Image (cartoon, rainbow, N blue to C red):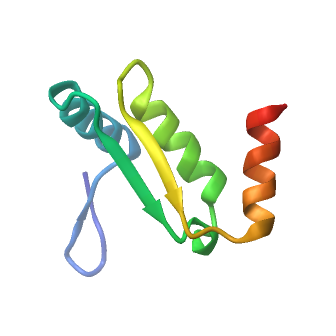
Amino acid sequence: MRSESQGQMVASEQSLVSLIRLFLDHLDGSFIVLEALDECAEWERCLGFLRGCTEQTNCKVCVQKISPSLFLVLLFRILY
């Protein structure tokens, strides 16, 4: 973890992955729900991060409230 200027501690990406995997290992059939993903500047990185966290688990990722254009991009990537 590193300290930010406001005095808050910020976890590294690897620490977050480890923590999420720890939770998912103990929760069978869990869901991660994302809302307003189209408001995220780095949505592709966010989804890649979650994919890495949920590999080899029974966890499902659900995305709600996305713009039609982002929906088409995600659908295209799933299908092709």
- Residue 50 locus on image (x, y percent): 47, 42
Residue extending farthest left: 26
Q: Residue 29 placed where, x, y %?
A: 28, 31
Q: Is residue 42 left or right of residue 51?
A: right
Number of numbered markers = 0
Q: Residue at x 73, y 36 (%)?
A: 78
Q: Residue at x 28, y 38 (%)?
A: 30
- Left/right placement of residue 35 relative to residue 69 reads left
View extreme (top): residue: 56
Vertical arrangement, residue 63 with respect to residue 38, above or below: above
The quadrant in which residue 31 appears is top left
Q: Residue at x 37, y 37 (%)?
A: 14
**Up-down relation of residue 47 to residue 7 (above or below):** above
Front position in the image: 63 or 55? 63
> Would you say 20 lies left or right of 48 here?
left
Pinpoint residue 24: horizontal percent, then vertical percent. 25, 32
* In this view, 3 is above or below 74: below
Can you say which quadrant of the picture contains the C terminus? top right
Q: Is residue 59 above or below residue 70?
A: above
Q: Residue furthest bottom?
A: 6
From the viewer's side, name the closer residue of 8 and 24.
24
Quarter of image, res 28: top left
Residue 11 % position (x, y): 29, 53
